[in-house]
Amino acid sequence: MPAHTNVTVVLIKNTNRESATRSFEHQEFEFDREPDTVKGGVDGYLGIGKHLTHAFWKGGRALDLKNVTDMHVLSADGQTLIKGQLKSTYNAPRDTVDGVTFDIL
């Protein structure tokens, strides 16, 4: 997985409270994204299958991701690298030696 340094990780909770969004600046983040599958059906419509993005956040903790529903990762120049839903059921976020690994859809 290629590393991206100096990114901003934005965590969003599905709530109406003011503390629903938290940002972590100057972070190191790695991710491996598999492109969506697009197939044409016999009915002429396209079927699109989304795949998980496997991510590693150096310095992050699984506790930081508790109750988080969505995540944005922004590059140093403000461009969106990842924007998606945090998978918290199957393959829930898990701590590693120097960070946390998890999946985003």
Image (spheres, rainbow, N blue to C red):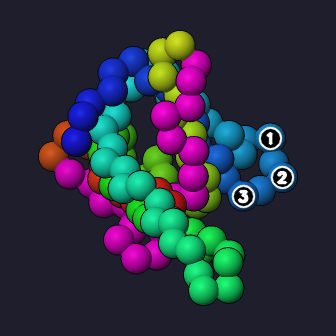
Question: Who is closer to the viewer here, 70 or 64?
Answer: 70
Question: Who is closer to the viewer here, 89 or 35?
Answer: 35
Residue 95 appears anywhere in the view: yes
Asked if residue 4 lies in the magenta stretch, the reply is no
Image coords of residue 39 (percent x, y): 51, 72
Would residue 4 be found to the left or right of residue 66 on screen? left
Cα–Cα span, label 2 and label 1: 7 Å
Report the disc number at residue 49: none
Report the disc number at residue 14: 3
Asked if residue 92 lies in the magenta stretch, the reply is yes
Residue drawn at the location 48% of the way across and 52% of the way down = 65
Residue 53 appears anywhere in the view: no
Cα–Cα span, label 1 and label 3: 11 Å
Image coords of residue 68 (percent x, y): 58, 55
At mark 2, the secondary structure is loop
For label 1, the residue is: 18
- The residues colored magenta run 78-96
For label 2, the residue is: 16
Image coords of residue 4 (percent x, y): 33, 27
